[in-house]
Amino acid sequence: MVCKVETEVSGLATDSRVPSALALPQRLEQSPREGPGSLGEEGQHLLSSTAAVQALASVIRPCYGPHGRQKLLVTTKGETVCTGHAAAILRALELEHPAAWLLREAAQTQAENSGDGTSFVVLLTEALLQQAEHLLKAGLPRPQLREAYATATAEALTTLPMLAIRSLGPLEDPSWALYSVMNTHALSHTDYLTKLVAHACWAAREKDGSFRAEQVGVCTLQGGTLGDSCLLPGLAMFGKLCGQMTVVLGGAKVALFACPFGPASSNAPATARLSSSADLAKFRKGSEQLIEKQVAQLAAMDINVAVVWGEIDEKSLTLADKHCIMVIQARSRAQMAYLSKVFSTPLQLHLLPPQKPGRCQRVYRQELGEDVAVVFEWEGTGTPALTVVLRGATPQGLRGAEQAVYHGIDAYFQLCQDPRLIPGAGATEMALAKMLSDKGSKLDGPNSPVFLAFARALRSLPKTLAENAGLVASDVMAEMSGVHQVGNFLIGVGAEGTVNVAQEGVWDTLTAKAQALRAVAEVVLQLVMVNEIVVAKNSPTYPQVLPPDSKTKKHSPPMKNKNPWNE
């Protein structure tokens, strides 16, 4: 195994003396004038991790906030996607550095669990690592830095609930709480879409007030505008209705097939060897009998809805009509995977009835403009109650609207768990920064400069909001700092300057912000304690020369090592 180890040694790394609380601020003031050559092993390696995190943050920073920019992404399949959502951008990036990998995993976990705060995780992690560099340059030992960062994070998480001045009532319309979450990247018709999502989530609640995100479906239909979006009962999907059966009432049993509905495809890895016309006639008759038997088996198991991702044979479709089986041709494998999850039934690779078919109350067609949707309806709880059908002129616009709707659904799920809301638009970050600065100025030991560094990192987030809005960041930050110093923590960054977030209705969910802070702390605390980066590469294979007297002796082949960062 060949390992590449990055290490550099200087005299500063060998100095194990702990700086006093009085000497550390002086060294912090001198550290910016020192060049990179003055860094020791501790600071030099952290710079390597920080460089990768800075590169990742430089991609995400222009997209942060409601006035963020868009990115044109070219996927590996050659498709061009225009998006400003950090989660989509992170998925498209090809990363090699382990620190960037670690940060992306944390940000994607945040997106999957809360639907919001992806950019927050990336940008705050980068700011904290930059502050960590200055502390290491000043001579603060790495273990004390990690412990002080953990203490500052705990203080921030303790203070965060004190900023929750509003909460969503159990019988209150959630539109006002979802608006700021969905109003991202200059989305048009935000008011209408917010009310649509709020109505869908409200109608899908259980009797005990609980809510599951799976109870609200989302599908897109190109054509029209976002103002033409609507709600459909149950789960709607866009597919092709084949055959004469268009409605199934009084109970439907659904089977999902990831194979052709009919004879095997001509591209199947099998060859029929025929030597005469009689063999050909016999082969065709056997194939038709097999299809008749398979369709009859479906009917015998009371399967009356078949969703197919594959080709549909006309003769097989005639047999399905004869047995009153509705056949629906899906548009993508993603649709099949989602239906499999909703119906709790597996995808069949052959035309055989499943052991546990999906069940719903009714299936019917619904015309929407020039397209047709297939609607599955249930009457029990725990199933999709409504589907948000999004209309739009371009795939890019539909993709952005779909992401905003998912953010709204996730936010409502969080509010059902914890209804508390905190100020948005950077006001919470400024309030936490003020609290840490006030406490850091009163502490002794290494906690004092670390608390101040954590506060500077938090202030970088509203500064980024001001820069993306085209404002003079220094003026906005000075005005916000002055207002927050006198105790008004409701002032944030708006389109034209500072705004009162309570009057503008800009709120964040407490759950999402707390989860994001924990994710940032986990990444930063890991990176500040990394000693070195070891990259294992495949060792070259050399021909083995055996001695004459060892021809019968077996030698094991050289072990091949995988690069863990390429897995």
Image: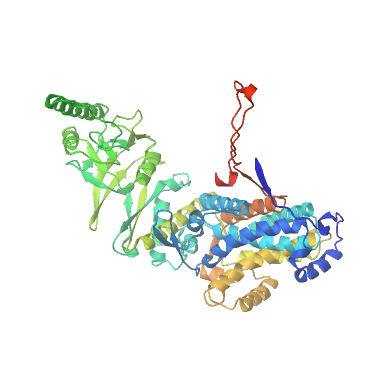
Residue 422 visible in the shown view: no
Q: Residue furthest top?
A: 552
Please name the residue shown 78% across and 51% down the image.
143
Q: Please state if 264 lies on the left or on the right of 547 as rendered.
A: left
In this rendering, the answer to whether 314 lies above or below 27 is above
Q: Quadrant of residue 562?
A: top right
Q: Quadrant of residue 442?
A: bottom right
Look at the image and tell me in which quarter the C terminus lies. top right
In this rendering, the answer to whether 61 lies above or below 537 is below
Look at the image and tell me in which quarter the N terminus lies. top right
Q: 467 or 564: nearer the eye?
A: 564
Q: 232 or 356: nearer the eye?
A: 356
Instruction: Please say which color scheme the image uses.
Output: rainbow
Q: Please state if 68 lies on the left or on the right of 363 as rendered.
A: right
Residue 418 horizontal/vertical position (percent) = 56, 51
Please name the residue shown 63% across and 24% down the image.
548
Q: 359 or 273: nearer the eye?
A: 273
Residue 487 horizontal/vertical position (percent) = 68, 70
In this rendering, the answer to whether 215 lies above or below 35 is above
Residue 25 horizontal/vertical position (percent) = 81, 67
Number of dots carrying numbers = 0
Q: Please state if 442 lies on the left or on the right of 55 as rendered.
A: right
Residue 406 visible in the shown view: yes
Residue 172 horizontal/vertical position (percent) = 47, 57
Q: Residue furthest front?
A: 548
In this rendering, the answer to whether 541 lies above or below 427 is above
Q: Quadrant of residue 22?
A: bottom right
